[in-house]
Image (cartoon, helix red, strand yellow):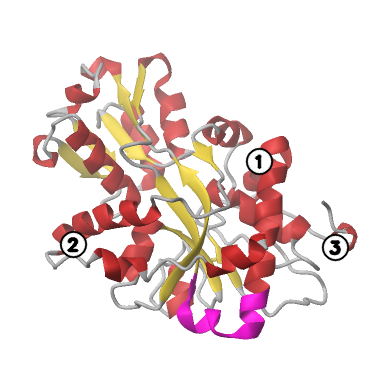
Amino acid sequence: MMLDLVKRLFISFAAMALTGCATVPSPAEPTSPLRLRANTGAIESAPILLAARDYFPGGLEVRRGAIPNLVGAENIPGVFEPGPADVATHAETQALRYSLKNPEIRIILTVTEGHYRVVARKSAGIATLADLKGKRIGTLPGTSAAYFLNRMLLSANISPQDVDIVKVPIAELAPQLAAQTIDAVAIWDPYGERAAVAIGEDLVSFSDRAVYREIFNLNTTAEKLADPVLRAEMVKLVRAIIAATADMKRAPARAQQIATHVTGFDPAEVSGAWSHMVFPASLPDDLLDVMVEEEKWLAEQAERPARSREQLAKLIDSSVLEEALR
């Protein structure tokens, strides 16, 4: 259901480089106090962008940011803009990381699930997942991609110590794979798609949703949930995301076009990556299970005790979604 008011909004999208600043402009007279931050360099944000433009009453500005904007933590220079937020997107990995010092963080909706890939070169002697043993694999340590790689290796009975994990800047993953300086990459899309295109017929790839999938969420804090004005706006936003997601499932072209313009990725990269994502607009039944297992890995990496299931359960708040569905 399209909102007549939104049709009168002047919305323009400029194609932005990944490290640039991209926002969905707000109406001339914003009607909502809600400050929304999303990773506008990631196509996982497509439902947010479509919802803010076409389904949120009066329109809603989307600024580039993430969980650090919620809690006043230091952000990644050149990737996210500084400034406060009331709601913000981020993968479950980063919700777990930031909630160590900020236990008031709350996950209120899963926007997108990303099915990551290990993209590898057949010419490096890789035909099965087990063949990754002894190979050089590029990824980003400490991210959901690194956790995905860890889980995939273990599923093939390969110890992470039996491969050479190489820290590679994200923009260099595809070029280095094509140049044969690394044998495989483990990363989210559309960088996985970019790597696959770069090696063409030399491609072999591995993915398993049952082993791991990124859970890209909308987050807020307990304090902001307790504010009746902000809470009401969050309910509107979740309803808008649910409606936008239903629209995307029927006809993905508009959402793909928004993602292309805002993220700066090539249209072919966006469309190629689309099949490796699902858009639930809900809270998965196994979200806590995923977080409990991932917490163990994060704790081991940081040489700290893992938090209990009961502690992690407090990070998930389904009440806004429940209200939005009523």
Q: Which residue is mark 3?
A: 9
**Disc 2, SS:** helix
In the drawing, what numbered circle is on residue 38?
A: none
Front disc: 1 or 2: 2
**Disc 3, SS:** loop
The segment highlighted magenta reads: 220-232
Q: Which residue is mark 1?
A: 256
Compared across the picture, whether 68 is left or right of 277 comes to left
Comparing 261 with 241, the one in front is 241
- The quadrant of the image that shows the C terminus is bottom right
Front disc: 2 or 3: 2
**Which residue in the rendered view is the most extreme toward the front?**
326
Residue 117 vertical placement versus 44 (above, below): above
Q: Residue at x 13, y 33 (%)?
A: 158
Residue 62 vertical placement versus 191 (above, below): below
Q: Residue at x 30, y 78 (%)?
A: 101
Q: Circle 1: is it few (<14), some (14-19), or many (20+) Cα within 10 Å?
A: many
Residue 281 vertical placement versus 21 (above, below): above
Q: Residue at x 58, y 62 (%)?
A: 21
Comparing 326 with 230, the one in front is 326
Q: Circle 3: is it few (<14), some (14-19), or many (20+) Cα within 10 Å?
A: some
In terms of secondary structure, what is the magenta stretch mainly? Answer: helix
Q: Residue at x 72, y 44 (%)?
A: 247
For the question of whether residue 188 can be seen, the reply is: yes
Q: Position of residue 71 (x, y in %)?
A: 43, 78
Q: Position of residue 256 (x, y in %)?
A: 66, 40
Q: CA distance from mark 1 to mark 2?
A: 37 Å
Q: In the image, what residue type sits under mark 1?
A: Gln
Q: Which residue is mark 2?
A: 299
Q: Position of residue 138 (x, y in %)?
A: 27, 39
Q: In the image, what residue type sits under mark 2?
A: Ala
